[in-house]
Amino acid sequence: MVDYLVKATVFDGKVRAYAAQTTHLVEEARRRQDTWATASAALGRTLTITAMMGSMLKGEDTITVKIEGDGPLGAIIVDGNADGEVRGYVMQPHTDLPSNEDEKLDVKRAVGEGTLSIVKDLGLKDYFTGQVPLVSGELSEDFTYYFANSEQIPSAVGAGVLINPDHTVLAAGGFIIQLMPGADDEIISQLEQAIEEFPAISTLIESGHTPEQMLEKLFEGEEINFLESMPVRFQCKCSKERIVQAIKGLGEAEIISMIEEDHGAEATCHFCNEVYKVSEEELVGLLPKK
Ligand code: ZN
């Protein structure tokens, strides 16, 4: 099954809902970054939520999410776009902590205390930035807090990742529910109760629930207006061309030293761990023609 997300409205448009199944893209990130269990869960939750936030953008707009906590994981950096493409990494991928008291992956302790920052590049040099303190470290709650405080949109965010005993990703997914103007107290209390009783998302995905079925379970008995379905995937923007351009920008002296000392250059993309090798001949080609 291909990863995808759905967008919907409920309660006559007074509530907006997003749900995603991201098992494959989180596994792709785990494979590329060689993340251990707790790191996979933290990165996977962030990738899942960023994929849904990206789907709220238009055209060429992009979003960058930075979670900078003081826990053993270090920072989590994820970016995404309006086409359902996300990429990301964590500073310390080999983070695996003992389970917490609920027998769950201890993402909270791995992340620690710090900040959640969002930058949206909206084109034509128009940026939106928001930063909030991490109120939980479990990430879903932190994004919920971010939406309420930085975007003034009351929201409920959920994301979960289940890891196999061999450390591969068994299931991943999430939802974002947002209240639009006109959502009254009755809707709010009905939603609060539904969310409180909602089973773990990763367990639902594992048992075969689609994003549509997750929303049907969450909004049981209500009419759901599904607006759109779109694929989501791990996709990096790096290329040999970009690496070569970056080296060119370092200047002649630096390139000459790469040729003389290293007989070539090697660069690794942080986002996808792809290694690019630039040969001595290619470096010579970057020097001004004499
Ligand atoms: Zn890359």
Image (cartoon, grey):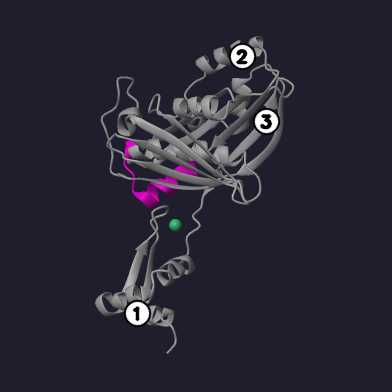
Q: Looking at the picture, does residue 274 appear above or below residue 39? A: below
Q: Which residue is mark 1?
A: 280
Residue 273 place in picture, x, y as percent: 38, 56
Which residue is identified by label 2? 188
Q: Is residue 267 magenta?
A: no
State the separation of the CA atoms marked 3 and 2: 17 Å
Of residues 145 and 50, the one nearer the viewer is 145
Tell me if residue 274 comes above or below residue 106 in the rendering.
below
Disc 3 versus disc 2: nearer the observer:
2
Nearer mark to the viewer, of 1 and 3? 1
What's the amino acid at mark 2?
Ile
Report the side of 268 relative to 231 (left or right).
left
Q: Of label 3 and label 2, which has the lower sequence position? A: 3
The first of marks 2 and 1 along the sequence is: 2
Q: Where residue 230 sits in the image (x, y, percent)?
A: 63, 43
Note whether ligand 1 is within 8 Å of mark 3.
Answer: no
Judged left or right of residue 34, residue 246 is right
Q: Quadrant of residue 179?
A: top right
Does the residue tagged 2 have its C-beta within 8 Å of any atom of ligand 1?
no
Q: Which mark is residue 47?
A: none
Q: CA distance from mark 1 to mark 3?
A: 53 Å
Give, as a three-letter code, the residue at label 3.
Ala
Q: Which residues fall within the magenta stretch?
A: 23-38
Q: Are marks 1 and 3 in contact (CB under 8 Å)?
A: no
Prevailing secondary structure class for the magenta stretch in the rendered image: helix
> Distance of mark 2 from mark 1, alpha carbons?
63 Å
The residue closer to the viewer here, 114 or 230, is 114
Circle 3 sits on which residue? 8
Is 215 situated left or right of 34 in this image? right
Query: Badges 3 and 2: C-beta atoms under 8 Å apart?
Result: no
Residue at 50% x, 57% y is 237
Q: Quadrant of the N terminus?
A: top right
